[in-house]
Image (cartoon, rainbow, N blue to C red):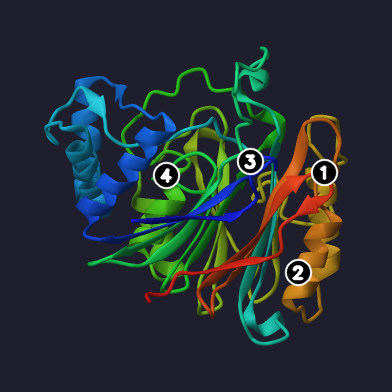
Amino acid sequence: MNITQVAGGRQDFQLVRHMTVRGGQIGIGRRLTDEALRLGWRPRPVDPTVNRARRTWFERHWPQHHARMDGAAEALGLDPDQDELALDGLGYVPTGSACSALWVPPSASADGHGRMARNYDFFTLTASEFNGGAPGPDELPMAARPYVITTIPDDGLASTVITMSDLDGCMDGINEAGLAVTLLIADIENTEPPQDTTPQVGLSSLQLPRFLIDTCATVEQAKQALLCAKQYDHGAPLHYLVSDAHGGAFVWERGANGTEHIVEVGDGPLCVTNHQLHRHPDPMALPADTEETLGTYGRLRALYEHSKGVTMSERDMCDGLEAVRAPEFGPFRTLWRTVFDTTERTLSSSFYLGDGRYTDELVFSARRG
């Protein structure tokens, strides 16, 4: 395992590390767990019956993750078949976001490359402040130490992901086949703080994009994988923008009573913010924003107007996201912007260092090498 500091420093808001992990999935799981332990993660007690079912589900549907959990057991000196502790969810801060995203297919791209881009909007608070208390001694803000993780398994798809919280999950990711996934809050008006974060059977919100990155090469495979998967969240439902190297893209979201929705717009730009697209399919017929919506409707209208009927370069996409970047008020910022190039199999990101200061674009590849 190789870990390098690629952006920021201890005097900046964010210090970004890039971790590269190679080898078998068990060894990758062991190395990720070692780093999570260093960051303060510990396995959580869980109902043994539920945990046994969780491991069975992963073994059947996500064998890569199941093997990495065996690696976590090795790192902890535990029996991988024990049922009392959850050996995944390698988290080190709470999670959540607002965010805006845009997909431009090859047909609307200046150079023929399909690209997806997003703003990751989040709070600059510590976990204690986020929950209404005072920060503890030396407590860092929740998003102060993001990781870029490149995984190159002996058997399976290589990938690069960005996470601010879970070393075995992600917010952004792309694999060597060119499948890219990013997550956003799905219903900002009705999102509530989690009441119970106990692991359940299936995919958590942050595991879902990693699951697709590990197991799928195209959007058609991703659709089938999601329709067959068991999913859950902890009071903050997310939706996901998925695209591939063949020019396909869709948004995956769940509605009332667990209904599942695949939202597509054909061969054109696809804009996503923080409301359910299946309920508001027309970008020009959206409700007015309120204090609770964090500008989700206005941001989507702005992205749509910026991208409709035009050919866009990567710079044009970044300009569109710049126009809807979170304003620097209170404890809320755009903490990074990512551009996914599904042709080149890269993601490039600019990270927040402090008021008005961002890093240059840092480019990371999902290809082997």
Counting from the top left corner in percent of width and height, residue 44 is at: 32, 23
Q: Nearer the viewer, mark 1 or mark 3?
A: 3
Tell me the amino acid under the disc marked 3: Arg
| Mark 2 nearby-residue class (10 Å; few <14, some 14–19, many ≥20) | many
Query: Which is more foreground, mark 3 or mark 2?
Result: 3
Q: CA distance from mark 3 to mark 4?
A: 21 Å
Question: Is any atom of residue 65 visible in this view?
Answer: no
Local crowd size for mark 4, using a 10 Å CA cut-off: few (<14), some (14–19), many (≥20): many
| Residue type (three-letter) at the residue carrying disc 1 | Asp
Q: Secondary structure at mark 1?
A: loop
Give me the disc on residue 317. Answer: 2
Which mark is nearer the camera, 1 or 2? 1
Task: Name above or below for residue 316 compared with residue 196.
Answer: below
Q: Which residue is mark 1?
A: 355
Residue labelled with disc 3: 10
The numbered mark, 1 or 4, whose residue comes first in the sequence reads 4
